[in-house]
């Protein structure tokens, strides 16, 4: 019996049947109790293998998405007024815009929920089976700078341009060098009408030319981003400042 189990595990390993490889004995034992038909038993094995693969794929995509700690929009605080309504956020979470390759710009002051909403939409996309990533503008610039020098950076860059959804956090916060701006334009141009992009920024599109120090490049960049795009303007005070933590006992 043990020899047969080992042989099944070996074949399962070759065929990459992860569930069967890990649970040969328990699966056979349960079948001896339930006494399913051959068809029922085969269907059960295939179903469990599919579920295992789907879960493994989900965990892989979730890990690679590089989401910040707080990213589940189920915990969104609607008592905090920032200019987006409950129905609007629900509509964004339905991801119809993603299926249509629409872009989203989340624009507003620091602390109004731009990053939280962007990462939450990436998380929602991952749950629905999309390849989605969250990245800061600083990390993106580093990847673009190193992609011609290291295989790891090139691999990350290739994943980004093959994504269904890419969320870029805090763009145009700092001035960009000309070669960085050109590389960023090339990335957006590669994604144009093939993928969706979420951008968070505290500057209006009109101010992008000042940051890029190139009006022609800024116009071409905006032309691609705004072609099919919803601009969500967030407002209000900083959520972090309103909910600032303290080390002191407030009762004292």
Image (cartoon, rainbow, N blue to C red):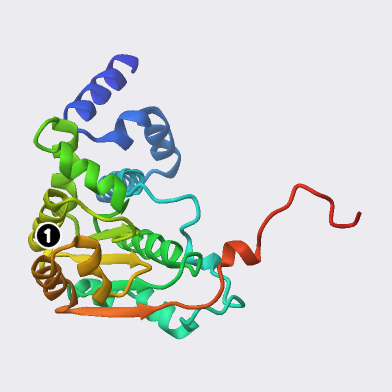
- In the visual, does 57 lie left or right of 34? left
Q: Residue at (13%, 38%) from the top-left corner? A: 147
Q: Is residue 100 visible?
A: yes
Q: Residue at (48%, 84%) from the top-left corner? A: 85
Image x and y of residue 219, in percent: 12, 73
The secondary element bearing badge 1 is classed as: helix
Image x and y of residue 68, in percent: 44, 51
State the residue position of label 1: 185
Compared with 11, 39 (above or below) is below
Image x and y of residue 62, in percent: 35, 48
Q: Residue at (22%, 78%) from the top-left corner? A: 229
- In the visual, does 214 lie left or right of 97? left
Image x and y of residue 110, in percent: 47, 65
Return the residue nearer the eye: 6 or 111.
Answer: 111
Q: Residue at (69%, 54%) from the top-left corner? A: 245
Q: Quadrant of the N terminus?
A: top left
Compared with 240, 152 (above or below) is above
Compared with 225, 35 (above or below) is above
Compared with 107, 47 (above or below) is above
Q: How many marks?
A: 1
Q: Quadrant of residue 240?
A: bottom right
């Amino acid at each position: 019996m043990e020899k047969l189990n080992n042989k099944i595990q070996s074949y399962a390993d070759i065929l990459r049947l992860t569930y069967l490889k890990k649970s040969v004995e328990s699966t056979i034992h349960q079948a001896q109790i339930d006494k399913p038909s051959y068809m029922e038993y085969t269907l059960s094995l295939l179903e469990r293998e599919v579920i295992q693969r789907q879960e493994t794929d989900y965990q892989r995509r979730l890990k690679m998405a590089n989401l910040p700690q707080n990213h589940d929009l189920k915990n969104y605080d609607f008592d905090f007024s920032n200019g987006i309504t409950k129905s609007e956020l629900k509509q964004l979470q339905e991801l119809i815009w993603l299926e249509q390759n629409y872009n989203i710009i989340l624009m507003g002051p620091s602390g109004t929920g731009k990053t939280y909403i962007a990462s939450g939409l990436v998380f929602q996309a991952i749950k629905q089976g999309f390849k989605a990533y969250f990245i800061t503008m600083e990390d993106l610039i580093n990847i673009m700078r190193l992609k011609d020098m290291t295989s790891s950076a090139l691999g990350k860059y290739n994943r980004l341009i093959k994504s269904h959804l890419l969320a870029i956090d805090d763009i145009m916060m700092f001035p960009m060098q000309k070669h960085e701006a050109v590389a960023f334009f090339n990335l957006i141009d590669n994604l144009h009408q093939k993928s969706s992009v979420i951008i968070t920024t505290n500057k209006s599109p009109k101010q992008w030319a000042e940051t890029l120090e190139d009006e022609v490049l800024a116009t071409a960049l905006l032309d691609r981003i705004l072609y099919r795009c919803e601009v969500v303007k967030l407002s209000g005070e900083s959520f972090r400042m309103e909910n600032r933590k303290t080390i002191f006992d407030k009762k004292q």
